[in-house]
Image: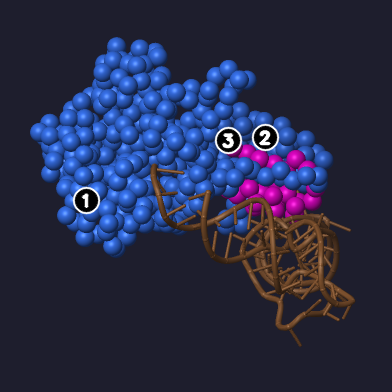
Chain colours: A blue, B brown
Amino acid sequence: MSIKINAVKGMNDVLPGAVGRWQELEAVAREVFALYGYREVRTPVVEPHALYARGVGEQTDIVGKEMYVFEDKGEDRLALRPEGTAGTIRAFIEHGAYVDGPQKWFYMGPMFRRERPQKGRYRQFHQIGVEAFGIAEPAIDAEQIAMVQDWLSRLGVSAALQLNSVGDPACRPAYLADLRGYLEGHAGTLCGDCRERTQKNPLRVLDCKVPGCQPVLQGAPRLLERLCQPCREHFAAVRAGLDALGVAYRVEPRLVRGLDYYVRTAYEFTSDALGAQSAVAGGGRYDGLVETLGGPPTPGVGFALGVERLALILEALGRPIPARRAAVFLISADAEGAAAVLRLSSELRKAGVACDLDARGGKLARQFKQAERVGARFALVLGGQELAAGEGKLKDMVTRTETPVRLSGLAARLREVAP
RNA sequence: GUGAGUAUAGCUCAGUCGGCAGAGCACUGGACUGUGGAUCCGGGGGUCAAGGGUUCGAACCCCUUUACUCACCCCA
């Protein structure tokens, strides 16, 4: 070997032995999303830098310090997408999809953020997300949250739902000003981080875990008590919707989302199987965003789920990784058998029976070992003896019993015993 | 960006006081000339992360660097 080349830091391989877990959760997502009327959209992994600067917000950590930005031959300033909503909205606007009334879209794919990797957080990570455009009513917020719940339950995962309202442009600015004033008044008793956050993102201060800060935070003004009437009604309706749909949640007044565009509904599904990065999915409403990005005023709600994190939860639960295996492994006992095996494999595959064989040939023992390794349900031995009789020896790899079978009609028989 | 921990075979890890580089699993061959799970016997596989220093002698002690992991920040 010459110089060894490894994967880029924070970017991981998902090998064949593990990829079944991803396929399972993706398959369930597609199934569930279809039940709720969401359709898939695929957008580029690279977008103009300006899309995120304007859409996600210059002052967010994501745009400010985590994005992969590069010049395309010195002409355009591009970025690897750090999240999926902005690009989806760009496509929504660009293709005039808003003329067709409300739209429910979903996407799945890689996102990129240049952070220090740790458990459940990677530089290339994968999100499955949905966006519902054109519906201002709280019913869609509730339906969407219920859909996440539905998806997770079908996977046997239970995650705690935390719900909050972060207000809107009518009530949040005044609240933030008050909160900042209050925090500045108590700056002396706050930790260094909090004094900084007071200016940068005062809502974050409320989430501080430093014991010394707690007394000040207890007395801080609360956003939920300062919501304007429309926000208050919206939040109440979302809660009523969740109750009607049988979704349990906890109101978490300190829940803040890291992206600037959220208004009103904000929520997060968390799991204690994840270590420090406990959020498996997060989302909320972003009513002004389509307009910010140059489209007509269009309300929107969406969420994104971390695929690596969900896979981590499934692993922690000890869930087996589903795998698609060959129904039958064809084994040749001699040269005659080898030729027959090749013909038979073609026939079986045409008939839709998954079969495999050891292209190396060789001793029976080795071929059986390979059959074992690939997890084939049955092994079929073919040699001169068998061919002369027009049959093969079918061995059940689990019970280890062997019975002669006619070669004609084999595909139909295999579909019966190894569907 | 900050902090801590770790680094020995493909994987998981031992390695005592500084004295020839080890185990289990995996792989491979045989015992078993047409049969995979067990058992037994054999085989291949190492820049002990890299570089420097101390020493008669370094996987082990010292310095530097790198990588990985976890955590902070923040987020999926």
Q: Given the image, what chain letter belongs to the residue carrying mark 1?
A: A
- In percent of the image, x 44 and y 47: which residue is there? A309
Q: Nearer the viewer, residue A280 or A402?
A: A280
Q: Which residue is mark 1?
A: A185
At horizontal 29% and vertical 11% (from top left) the residue drawn is A99
> Disc number at residue A362?
none
Residue A132 in magenta stretch: no
Count residues near mark 1 (Cα–Cα under 10 Å), then give few for <14, some for 14-19, many for 20+.
few
- Dot 1 or dot 3: first in sequence order is 1
Earlier residue among tags 3 and 2: 2
Mark 3 nearby-residue class (10 Å; few <14, some 14–19, many ≥20)? many
Residue range corresponding to the magenta coloring: A353-382
Indicate the chain on which mark 2 is placed. Answer: A
Q: CA distance from mark 1 to mark 3?
A: 73 Å
Q: Residue at x 43, y 24 (%)?
A: A51
The residue labelled by disc 2 is A345
Mark 1 and mark 2 in contact (Cβ < 8 Å)?
no
Residue A192 % position (x, y): 36, 54
Which label was assigned to residue A353?
3
* Position of B40 relative to A347 (above/below): below
Q: Quadrant of residue A102?
A: top left
Q: Is residue A207 left or right of residue B62?
A: left
| Type of amino acid under label 3 | Val
- For numbered disc 3, what is the local secondary structure? loop
- The reply to whether residue A277 is in sight is yes
Residue type of the residue flagged with mark 1: Gly
- Secondary structure state at the residue bearing disc 1: helix
Q: x and y percent of residue B23 in the render?
A: 72, 72
Instruction: Report if the CB atoms under discs 1 and 3 are less than 8 Å apart.
Output: no
Q: Is residue A263 left or right of residue A277?
A: left
Amino acid type of the residue that numbered disc 2 sits on in the rendered structure: Ser
